[in-house]
Amino acid sequence: MPGHAVAGVDEAGRGPLAGPVVAGAVILNDHLAIEGLRDSKKLSPKRRSELAREIRLHSLAWSVAWADAAEIDSLNILGATLLAMRRAILGLPLRPQFVQVDGNRLPELSFGTERIEGEAIVRGDASIAAISAASIVAKVCRDQIMVEMDRIYPNYGFARHKGYGTVDHRERIDRFGPCQQHRRSFRPFRVLAPGSMTLTD
């Protein structure tokens, strides 16, 4: 692998109706293995939190960053995801020589006069330990953000469903209307008239 500092990069929260898309970037310590790394979606919340603590303690470097709902609406979800990934890479205290990104697209990897090489790996979160670690820290961070949003916007149940389009969440949007954290460019939102919005299939 080119270079000695390889960062894994992944995101959490592309599909929800509300909240940010969060990206993680992790450079693991080759001499200090973390057992149990895998796709964050296949881990229980408790195990994710435990592993996130280990990753923060024992990796060479880690970072999380996000793009908020307004940026998602402005850029589209792919553009916002790539922006969050770029921010996470930029936030690493140790600059990697190479990045491995989950999926089939790379974020912009030019930083001033420097460019980092990278590769996109489909299902990389299931096969590359550093990408798995990035998916875990991203997911744990995003869940914490949504719990905090639940305190600010108590009508929507964000702490329970984390912004995903559950029946309860959709019913609450119908009842209270969308808040600032909802991705208004996403279906099933549909503008009926200026200042009003409802849900549709």
Image: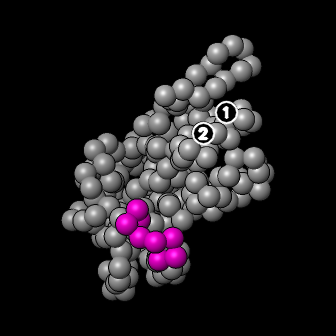
- SS for callout 1: helix
Q: Which residue of the protein is positioned furthest toward the bottom in this rendering?
A: 32
Answer with the quarter of the image where residue 37 lies: bottom left
The label number, if any, that marks residue 101 in the structure image: none
Residue 125's place in the image compared with 180, above or below, is: below
Residue 145 falls inside the magenta stretch: no
Q: CA distance from mark 2 to mark 1?
A: 6 Å
Label 2–label 1 contact, CB within 8 A: yes
Which residue does the image show at 32% across and 80% down from the upper left?
A: 30
Image position, residue 131 (x, y; %) = 35, 63
Image position, residue 187 (x, y; %) = 50, 29
Q: Main secondary structure of the magenta part?
A: helix
- SS for callout 2: helix
The label number, if any, that marks residue 174 in the structure image: 1
Residue 43 shown left or right of residue 199 in the figure: left
Residue at which label 2 appears: 170
Which residue does the image show at 39% across and 44% down from the upper left?
A: 107
Residue 147 shown left or right of residue 161 in the figure: right
Q: Amino acid at mark 2?
A: Arg
The boundaries of the magenta stretch are 40-47
Residue 47's place in the image compared with 130, above or below, is: below
Residue 42 falls inside the magenta stretch: yes
Residue 135's place in the image compared with 51, above or below, is: above
Indicate the colouring scheme: one colour
Image position, residue 138 (x, y; %) = 50, 60
Residue 188's place in the image compared with 80, above or below, is: above
| Disc 2 residue crowd, few under 14, some 14–19, many 20+, Cα 10 Å | many
| Residue 34 shows in this picture | yes
Front residue of 144 and 46: 46
Q: Amino acid at mark 1?
A: Asp
Answer with the quarter of the image where residue 128 lies: bottom left
